Image (tube, grey):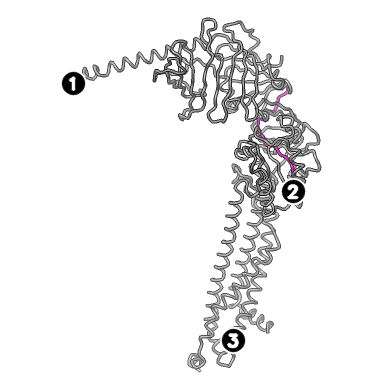
Amino acid sequence: MKTIIALFLSIQLPFILTAQVSDLKALKIIEEIDKNMFSKTQIVTSEMIVYGKRKKRIIRSRGYSMGKENNFTEYLFPEREKGTKMLKLNERLWIYSPTTDRTIQLSGHLLRQSVMGSDLSYEDMMEEKRLSEVYVAKIIQEENYNESPVWVMELVSKVEGLAYHKRVLWVDKNKFVPLKENLYAKSGTLLKTTTFSDIRKINKRWFPMKMNYKDVLKDGKGTDFIILDVSFNSKIPEGYFSKNILKK
Amino acid sequence: MIKFIIRGILRDKSKSIIPIAVISVGVMVTVMMSGFLEGVFSDVINQNAKLDTGHVKIMTKPYAENKEQLPNDLALLGINELIDSLNLNYPDLIWTPRIKFGGIMDVPDASGNTKLQGPGIGLAISILSEESGELQRLQLNKSLKKGRLPKRSGEIILSDNYATKLNLSPGEKITFFGSTMEGSMVFQSYEMTGTVEFGSPLMDKGTFIIDIRDAQNMLDMENGTGELLGYFKDDKYDDQKALVIAENFNAKFQESKDEYTPVMFTLKDQNGLRESLDVGDAFSGIFIFIFILAMSLVLWNTGLIGGLRRYNEFGIRLALGESKNNVFKLLLIEASVIGLIGSIIGTSLGLVFCYYLQEVGIDISKDVANSTIIMPSVMRAYVTSDLFYIGFIPGLFSMLFGTALAGRGIYKRETARLFKELEV
């Protein structure tokens, strides 16, 4: 019996150890990604280019975020959207419209609606959870993507209630930044793809300045999200994350 | 002679009660079913025409392909010019634009924050224009449950169910939150002036109505519309005419390379109505045919039994020298009188029931509460002129036919054997 156990262990142990090492490596990688992509605070001025059926629209906004719970966005351009504000506190989202002087709260399935006709949903904009905290990662392949060596990683949700149950990431081995991401529903259906480009080094971190979100259930070439300016860990006044900011 | 036959029928109830009862019941059911099916099919057509399809409808090709998603980014543009050309080419029709759009209706509390909200479907019609005829077409005055209809821009009416869900009363403010034709975020506050009941569960669930101009401004659809509906000026749908118009219109754009080419559809070519109504028509035809056939068989059988019962009577009459033709002729006249009486009773009863179903109807709102097609919540019969003969003629002829088949036996009787049979 002892011989059988010893034989079994001698065969299985290298595999078990290799798997554990691989899991640890995967965890380290997504922690590095989190370090690049997340910060205590973030102030981003961006342009969202929505490719409509008949014309394209450019929407400029400035977003302030603190941790993973608080986010405030003010739309700057075009005239129609100017002054519209969005505030996310924990799991709740409010939108303020200057034309009607109304604040509307969105919740439940309404958060899955598209933001301004783009391929992004309110849920996508709200979800700022660190990958290492909510997903279990494993490396499934190593290859080249756009001439950069990448790890292809599979991330499966370890908590309930995430917008995407599974993510497949193509992670740049040198910069620890995803270059491409496929987002899946719990059923395994591919819902969205995101590509990251124009990766720049800002304050000792690599950060993608251009993203393309593509809802695979929609026609068209997706929505471009271009970062014009970003600052990490800058001080943001507390008042930016209170409902009073909406009507100011 | 007729008087003599009627007296015979009345005196010998055994030869009249069962056939009259069978004919009456048969004719009554035929009349009732015809009136009911006619009513239901007409209501389905009228309701679809009024609320959704028009007698003909024009949309862009891609809009038509995705119309369930209300894709206003694929809407028709330059509709004023299109309507001018349509008025010139098809003078029998009145054209009216309609925009359908989805969004959230949000009810504010005293400080302007969300108190209640719910998703809804907006229907933008020419509600403020008298000439459009939309108020009469949709019978909004009749459907009004609370308050009044919009009189000016910035006013809105909701389906009564929707208003109840949002706990909203006439005079209160409500904000629409949705997106424009191109997808921009849109907020627009309205004053709710009243509630309506459309009589269609699909529409009554969560529909609101605003004026088309308000919708065009709000959704950035200036001189545009999702759908352009055409109605015959006499308000009666003529499928043949509609098909010719649609064919003619579509032929003009056949070679067009524009992605947003307009396409015209007839009422029956939308919402699967042609198939449903054709199947319904065939079903009602088959039903009536089977019913008349069954009634004829029953009456034939009744005639046969009557013939057997009256075997001796016929024998004596033949023995006394009455001709076979005369016996058969009198039998047929007798059958006609019975058929006539049964048909009159059956048609009268059928019409009474039809009238009751026309006025009261059968409420199916609970059964079709989750229906995804436009259909009336109350099924009604229609008393139409054809109901006066649709059961009457078969009632009369089935008795005659049954008796004629049964009476053939008269010709098989041989005078030589009659006395032996009668034991004279």
Mark 2: few/some/many CA within 10 Å (<14, 14-19, 20+): some
Between B122 and B258, the one nearer to me in the picture: B258
Looking at the rendering, the stretch of residues picked out in magenta corresponds to B94-111
Q: Residue furthest front?
A: B255
Say which residue label 3 marks: B325
Q: State the residue at coordinates (79%, 38%).
A: B128
Kind of residue at disc 2: Tyr
Point out the frontmost of discs 1 and 2. 2
Which residue lies at the image location 57% right of the left edge and 61% below the top edge? B287
Residue B133 % position (x, y): 78, 44
Taking the magenta stretch, the answer to whether it contains residue B101 is yes
Secondary structure at numbered mark 2: loop
- Picture layout, residue B228 above or below residue A20: below
How many numbered marks, from 0 up?
3
- Mark 1 = which residue? A1
User: Tag 3: residue type?
Assistant: Asn
Judged by depth in the image, the label closer to the viewer, 3 or 2, is: 2
User: Does B194 lie within the magenta span?
Assistant: no
Residue B350 % position (x, y): 66, 63
- Chief secondary structure of the magenta span? strand
Q: Is residue B138 above or below residue A87?
A: below
Question: Which residue lies under the disc numbered 2?
Answer: B90
Asked if marks 1 and 3 fall on the same chain, the answer is no
Q: Are marks 3 and 2 in contact (CB under 8 Å)?
A: no
